[in-house]
Amino acid sequence: MYIRLVEAEARQGKAPALESVYEEYVVPNLEASDGCMFAGLLQSVEQKNMYASLTLWESKKKLHDYVEAGEYDKNLKKVKPYLEAGSEWKIRLSRKDTLEYGPVKKAPRVKSYPVVSDKQLLSDRVASKNSYLRVLSLQIHPGREKEFEKIYIEEIQPELEKTHGCRYSFLVDNTSHGNEMISITLWDDIESIKTYETGGSFSRLIGKVKETLAELYQWKMTLESEPGSPRSATSMEMDISKFTFVTGKKFR
């Protein structure tokens, strides 16, 4: 099974129109696409003009066929009038763990990943509204991918299942493109996420995989653990995004 995220920025004042077109046109089009099991539109908690389309697919081939048939381009054409154009500059962490500046286009960013852990139908767990999605991206030390995966499945997932407000968790593997592993969790409310991040649970679980992370992350975690450190675990250069569901529909 594959999960696909298409991230984009809505133009000023066009968010309601984007949401409407997604629900009235994009969702039905995806429902008619062979192999698509779920489609949902998410809105960033931190940046209200940032959106992401989340779709679940039966296989990589079904997703490939959808793109090759031109259906993705049709959907993009429908929402493009409501998306921001141009580019911006931002600092980012490169694949070599060095900080670099570079232009980031505001065109939709497309990411597709195979699901590693718990391959049951995620669409059974994803709510259409009143839930939150947290995406944590981590760079893994080359050669430690299987170790990270084992710890996540055997130690971290059981802990997450017992965490108040955490509805579900799963792992996606992007190690073929920059040694990236992504933990995606579904939550009942934003307060539960904040408690998880600031109450010590997140730091404790990250500590379980510390030795498998890229060297820069390990160094930063060491600094964080020193007495009097003004920074928290959530301020490290890990890519953490939070979204709330605007609309969504399970197809099959």
Image (cartoon, rainbow, N blue to C red):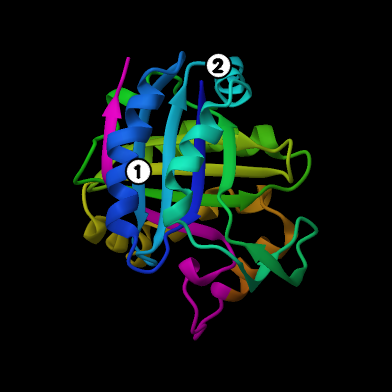
Q: Is residue 162 visible?
A: no
Crowd band around label 1 with a 10 angstrom C-alpha radius: few (<14), some (14–19), many (20+): many
**Which sits in the foreground, 100 or 35?**
35
**Above or below for 37 versus 45:** above
Q: Which residue is mark 2?
A: 62
Q: Which residues are magenta?
A: 224-252
Q: Quadrant of residue 128?
A: top left
The disc labelled 2 sits on which kind of residue?
Answer: Lys
Q: Residue at x 32, y 26 (%)?
A: 28
- Residue 228, image x, y percentages: 49, 86
* 202, above or below 30, in the image: below
Residue 45 place in picture, x, y as percent = 34, 61
> Residue at label 1?
41
The quarter of the picture where the C terminus appears is: top left
Verify whether residue 233 appears in magenta: yes
Q: Secondary structure at mark 2?
A: helix
Q: Secondary structure at mark 1?
A: strand
Q: Amino acid at mark 1?
A: Leu
> Where's residue 160, x and y in %?
35, 42
Examine the rendered structure and indicate whether residue 236 appears above or below residue 208: below
Q: Which mark is residue 177?
A: none
Asked if residue 83 can be seen in this view, the reply is yes
Give the camera-side residue of 214 and 96.
Answer: 96
Identify the residue at horizontal 28%, vertical 38% (top origin): 23
Percent from the top left, x then y, of residue 235? 50, 71
What residue is at 52 percent from the left and 83 percent from the top?
229
